[in-house]
Image: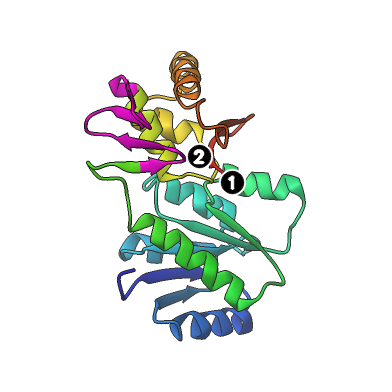
Amino acid sequence: MKKNYRLLLAEDEPSLGLILKESIESRGFQVDHCEDGEKAWLSYQQKDYDLLILDVMMPKLDGFSLAKKVRNSDSYIPIIFLTAKSTTEDVIEGFEKGGNDYVKKPFSMEELIVRVKALLERKSNPIHQEWTPVGKYNFHPGKQLLKFEQEELYLTSKESEVLKELILHQNELTDRSLILEKLWGSADFFNARSMDVYISKLRKKLEKDPDLQILNIRGYGYKLVCG
């Protein structure tokens, strides 16, 4: 991992915010702490951050609303939500608002640091024009090619683009609308149906590895699970 990652921490409890800031900085990160969502949004607009840690229940602008605003300008910056809200519905809402991870209070600092490092590591190793392992397959986005042992499977341009997006967020929920906006330019009904067709084709081409699945999370999007 590169050094000098800059993180934005939005936490409205001053004492907890100070503890988190000092603890994260002791691991070598730079941290800007804001005590409400509006200040965090202004800071996000003024500086270049590598990851956001957002408390959900904040004054002026809550964490979910802040994440939604961020996602309108950046689809890929990692976002971790901190919250005491722990129902399944709350977690789903967090992912729907663009979160990459969801840490329930109370939590250990080591747990948070592990999650931060995992997301930053994933962000710093995007897929380039080279062979990338996907379960028991190998994928080359430039050549639009999948390999399974000695067998080669050629992908269409759109199949390759969709698979690349899923791999970039493998084992995470991937917002359906974000993929549609990026690859099709619009999240309308007809483009959504088109993407469903490509997902079905990719599932068929990846079926030789039973531990590799593309899950459809109804109402949200997709999740590429690599066993």
Q: Is residue 92 above or below residue 52?
A: above
Judge left or right: residue 40 versus residue 97.
left
Q: Identify the image quadrant of residue 47.
A: bottom left
Whole-percent x, y for residue 192 in the image = 48, 20
Residues rendered magenta in the picture: 133-158
**Between residues 23 and 56, which one lies in front from this camera angle?**
23
Which residue in the protein does label 1 denote?
Answer: 95
Residue at 33%, 35% in the rendered image: 139
Residue at 33%, 55% in the rendered image: 125
Q: Is residue 151 magenta?
A: yes
Quote the CA–CA distance across marks 1 and 2.
9 Å
Q: Amino acid at mark 1?
A: Phe
Whole-percent x, y for residue 203 in the image = 50, 24
Structural crowding at the residue carrying mark 2, measured as other residues with C-alpha within 10 Å and reported as few (<14), some (14–19) or many (≥20): many
Q: Is residue 175 above or below residue 106?
A: above
> Which callout, 1 or 2, points to the residue nearer the camera?
2
Which residue in the protein does label 2 denote?
Answer: 174
